[in-house]
Image (cartoon, rainbow, N blue to C red):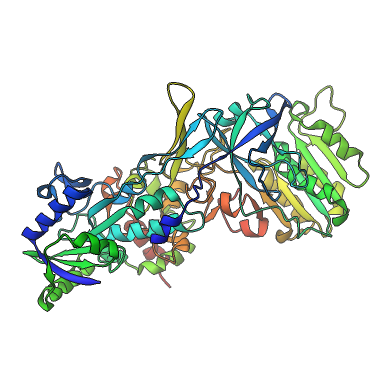
Amino acid sequence: MCECCSVEKDIYLPQTATVQEARILNATEIFVRFGMDDGNFDYVPGQFVEVSIAGIGEAPLTIASSPTFTGGIDMVVRRIGNVTNAIHKLRPGDKIGIRGPLGNGMYPVAEARGRNVVFICGGIGLVPQRSFINYVLDNRDDYGDVAILLGTKDPSQRFLTEELEAWARRKDVIFIETVDKGDASWKGKVGVVTTLISEIKDTLAGAVVSVCGPPIMYKFVLMSLAEYNIPADDIYLNLERKMKCGVGKCGHCQINNVYVCVDGPVFKYSDLATLPEAI
Amino acid sequence: MTTKTISKKAFKEFVNAIIAAEKVIGVQAKGERFDFAELTSADDLRLDYDVTLQAPKKYFLPPCETLMTFEVGGGYQSHIADEPFVLLGVHPYDVVAIAQMDELFSQNNADVHYLKRRANATIVAVDVVTASKNVFASSMKTATTRTGFDILLTDIGNAYVMEIATEKGRKLAAQATATVASADDLAKRESIWKANEKGLNKHPLEVNPEYLGKLLDKAYDHPVWEEKAATCFSCGSCNLVCPTCYCFNVQDDVNWDLKTGQRGRAWDGCLLDGFAKVAGGHDFRKKRADRFRHRLYRKAKYVPAKIDGQIACVGCGRCVGACLPDIANPVSVYNRLVDDLGIG
């Protein structure tokens, strides 16, 4: 017990970071790029940070950029709670607090090497996936065929549209997008994201599949993937939960015996399938 | 380790001597019941108590505490409480609970706030003299303990047997006028231990506690969760009084100058509505029955997996008394499961 006196690091203490760029993307999303004030930050796609806005609180947010990008750390944030609304007021030069990177459950950047990679994203579920997507695209030769499927509720909720267009133009990436409900301006596909899965049959063969979206989406995506006999070991899900501490103590993010903050937020479906509380 | 005997008169002098030297938290009467509070005189100490209203965990994980201070637009600075104190009169089941918390807050990401308070504490345990009306520590094998304290007192009538287990205990006991415990005193203590290991058992568990994890493996969809939770107020009283509940919330508080403030943590409870609700409104454990089940799975399955299989219910019985609709008693749920599902 007395070795505890030697514990010096405070796991709850954020380090300061400075906002480099803040850009409103649509009615609900903001893009924020920041840099750590002490420069140090090594992470793996799928890891998250606890972002502090002093006086308001902390929120867990998955990093949206890839560690292959060295110009800053990105997040895309929907304003929905106290902290995320405060994040929407950030301007370049503002200070924020960062704890992390957190989470031992990360995207399988190494295991997926040499294989096809499929990303299935629902709405803001695109954000955590962007870290893995950009990692794969920055190391394009290391991976097989790449397909990105994106479903958004309606055209007004789309974001990072320039990046989406760039993916769509690439010859070495299959990018297919749909919206649940179109409008007069929308010329693309209409329907839920699962309707796109049959279009990438060939890429799905032997692929690692990475899924992130709203809770309702997972079950339908998994049902569709089951039709193509994708092993549960090859499906990765990125989950959201309420979090406070981010380090496996406070109890909020527990799914049965699993802590999303330390065991996730990215899980193999095979590890989650036995947990009734997962979805 | 040395074992001594100290007369009750000398013990009183000993306690007053400690009070003069440092902060002492001791068990005292509170109305017709008992609680831990700062002790100013040995006359107020009640080592014959049955159970305290609150578990002593609050001295290591306070109901509200400041984790850090900050300046808006600036940095954050850890706020770590650093004051030595003596915790006097902890029952064995609570000693076991503290030892479990020590492990939980030390493992993986060590929590310096908890551990600093813990390192600053000298724990003087005392064997139970009066069984509380809901205690079931004998069932949980926590009615007595041989570890987890710095000093253990056992009331043998006109004196206490005083087991000094650690260096901290030795330093504290240096102020006491005590003699080496006689074989007769040790025999008296042995018989008290034997009696408590059987007698602190108002709600006998029908199964060996080690088996509870396996029992729960087949109980996830049992009707007992819905039945019990049908009258649950989601008040969190069971969480509040539990010596092994440690879930917490973290919140910022900005000062009147709007420039400085503090981030604190406060106890939270998994039975409370909204415990797992995220911004935007999705609640990952919305049903009362799911929250009720989660608590009992944590106690007998989830937390034990982190602490070498120890059951995270020490049989103090506080939740039994705190629960207004009288559904919190873990034994009545576990026994029901044993009856329905068998132990084979």
Image quarter of the C terminus of chain B = bottom left
Residue A125 falls in which quadrant of the image? top right
Give the side of residue B270 with respect to residue A109, left or right.
Answer: left
Question: Which residue occupies the extreme right position in the image?
Answer: A171
Residue B217: percent from the left, percent from the top? 49, 63
Q: Is residue A181 above or below residue B4?
A: above
Q: Is residue A223 above or below residue A39?
A: below
Residue A118: percent from the left, percent from the top? 80, 50
Image quarter of the N terminus of chain B = bottom left
Give the side of residue A143 with respect to residue B181, left or right.
Answer: right
Q: Residue at x 70, y 36 (%)?
A: A124
- From where the camera sits, is residue A116 visible? yes
Q: Residue at x 51, y 51 (%)?
A: A248
- From where the camera sits, is residue B297 visible? no
Residue situated in front as seen by the camera: B98 or B24: B24
Residue B214: percent from the left, percent from the top? 46, 67
Q: Is residue A52 above or below residue B120?
A: above
